[in-house]
Amino acid sequence: MCQPFVRQALVTGNFKTIVQQPNYVDTNEWLALYAHEFFALLNSFYDAISEFVTPQACPTMNAGPGVDYLWIDASKKAVRLPAATYIDYTFSWITSKLEDKTIFPTKVGVPFPPHFISILKNIFRQMFRVFAHIYHNHFDKMCHLGIQSHWNSLFTHFIGFVINFDLIDEKEREPLQPLIDSLEAQGMFL
């Protein structure tokens, strides 16, 4: 995550205007739209580098030294997994949530469930973990493929949205806090 690569982006200016909820748009609808959009884009970027996320290269899902992410299995036990397996499980879990019409209703007049925000926060937390893993372990591949400007723009948009709607705790953001601070100092989203 070295300069100048982390400063390269497609968009110059402030992302705040594009993450703000438009007038007359329901908050949950706005949040749901962005959950779908960010997930689709994150999934596409992961596809571009997934061949490098092997059990040999990434025996654990981490975001740098001392930051290991554990998967909570069906019996509520924390399990250490290779990054590829963790990300596959994460993407499958997110897909199941996004496709669940009781959580993300698609019919007019069908309300979002009362626990929608807590599910949404878990979705965004898991997406953030994938961002953090990629930045800490595979950003060089993004640079090698020449897609770092696109990746950085996606992350800037994502983190601006997350901060604007308070979707991820500050503690969870720590692995990428220096990058977030740099983006903030550049006036990218606040």
Image (cartoon, rainbow, N blue to C red):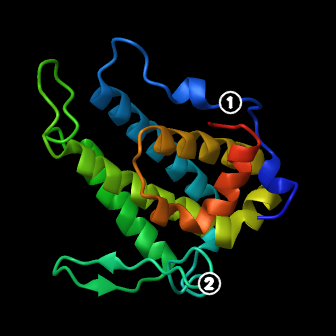
Tell me what residue is drawn at x 59 percent, y 88 percent.
56
Q: Position of residue 155 (x, y in %)?
A: 61, 48
Q: Quadrant of the N terminus?
A: bottom right
Residue in the image at 53% along x and 50% along y: 42
Residue 52, quarter of the rendered image: bottom right
Pick whichever, 88 or 168, lies toward us: 168
For numbered disc 2, what is the local secondary structure? loop
Mark 2 or mark 1, earlier in chain: 1
Choose between 177 and 59: the one closer to the eye. 177
For the question of whether residue 50 can be seen, the reply is no
- In the image, 116: left or right of 55? left
> How far apart are the two marked residues, 2 and 1, measured between alpha carbons?
31 Å
Which residue was labeled with disc 2?
A: 65
Q: Position of residue 31 (x, y in %)?
A: 36, 34
Give the x, y percent position of residue 66: 56, 85
Position of residue 165 relative to residue 77, above or below, is: above
In the displayed structure, 84 sits above or below 34; it is: below
- In percent of the image, x 41 and y 45: which residue is there? 166
On the picture, is 120 further left or further right than 181? left
Which kind of residue does numbered mark 2 sit on?
Answer: Pro
Mark 1 crowd level (few <14, some 14–19, many ≥20, 10 Å Cα): some
View extreme (right): residue: 4
Which of the two residues, 119 or 138, is positioned nearer the viewer here?
Answer: 119
The residue indicated by pointer 1 is 14
